[in-house]
Image (tube, rainbow, N blue to C red):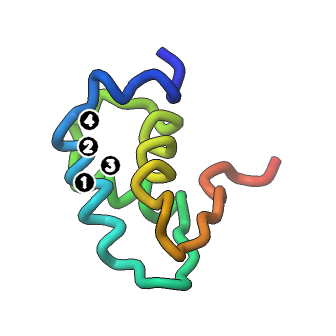
């Protein structure tokens, strides 16, 4: 399932984990996708979503805020 189409099957634990992880950020902060993704995996270890789906959820929840998003989840080759 493409990341853009998974909203209908949203896992409440994943949503809560992303929300909780984003609480550490403040206006004008830069959200580290890598850090938030690790925190979501720690808070919701049984989350069935792929990293890409969680990233989409992070971006969706961060949209409309004054926070920047750093897509730093992948290591440089």
- When the figure is inspected, residue 44 is found, relative to residue 42, above or below; the finding is above
Residue that appears at 47% across and 84% down = 27
Which residue is at the far right?
77
16 and 46: which is toward the camera: 16
Q: Which residue is mark 1?
A: 17
Real-space Cα separation, disc 1 to disc 4, in angstroms: 9 Å
- When the figure is inspected, residue 69 is found, relative to residue 6, above or below; the finding is below
Of labels 1 and 4, earlier in sequence is 1
**CB under 8 Å between callouts 1 and 4?**
yes
Real-space Cα separation, disc 3 to disc 1, in angstroms: 8 Å
Q: Secondary structure at mark 3?
A: helix
- When the figure is inspected, residue 6 is found, relative to residue 73, above or below; the finding is above
Residue that appears at 40% across and 54% down = 61
Relative image position of residue 9 (x, y in whole percent)? 28, 22
Real-space Cα separation, disc 3 to disc 2, in angstroms: 9 Å
**CB under 8 Å between callouts 4 and 2?**
yes
Real-space Cα separation, disc 3 to disc 4, in angstroms: 7 Å
- When the figure is inspected, residue 4 is found, relative to residue 30, above or below; the finding is above
**Of the two numbered discs 1 and 4 in the rendering, the one whose residue sits closer to the viewer:** 1
The crowding category of the residue bearing disc 4, from other C-alpha atoms within 10 Å (few below 14, some 14 to 19, many at least 20), is: some
**CB under 8 Å between callouts 3 and 4?**
yes
**CB under 8 Å between callouts 2 and 1?**
yes
Q: Which residue is mark 4?
A: 47
38 and 71: which is toward the camera: 71
Q: Which residue is mark 3?
A: 41
Relative image position of residue 72 (x, y in whole percent)? 65, 59
Label total for image:
4
**Of the two numbered discs 3 and 1 in the rendering, the one whose residue sits closer to the viewer:** 1
Q: Secondary structure at mark 2?
A: helix
Q: Quadrant of residue 13?
A: top left
Q: Which residue is mark 2?
A: 14
């Amino acid at each position: 399932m493409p990341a853009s189409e998974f909203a209908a099957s949203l896992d409440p634990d994943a949503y809560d984990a992303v929300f909780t992880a984003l609480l550490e950020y403040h206006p004008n902060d830069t959200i580290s996708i890598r850090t938030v993704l690790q925190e979501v995996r720690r808070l919701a270890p049984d989350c069935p979503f792929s990293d890409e789906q969680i990233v989409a959820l992070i971006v969706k929840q961060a949209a409309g805020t004054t926070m920047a998003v750093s897509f730093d989840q992948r290591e440089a080759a």
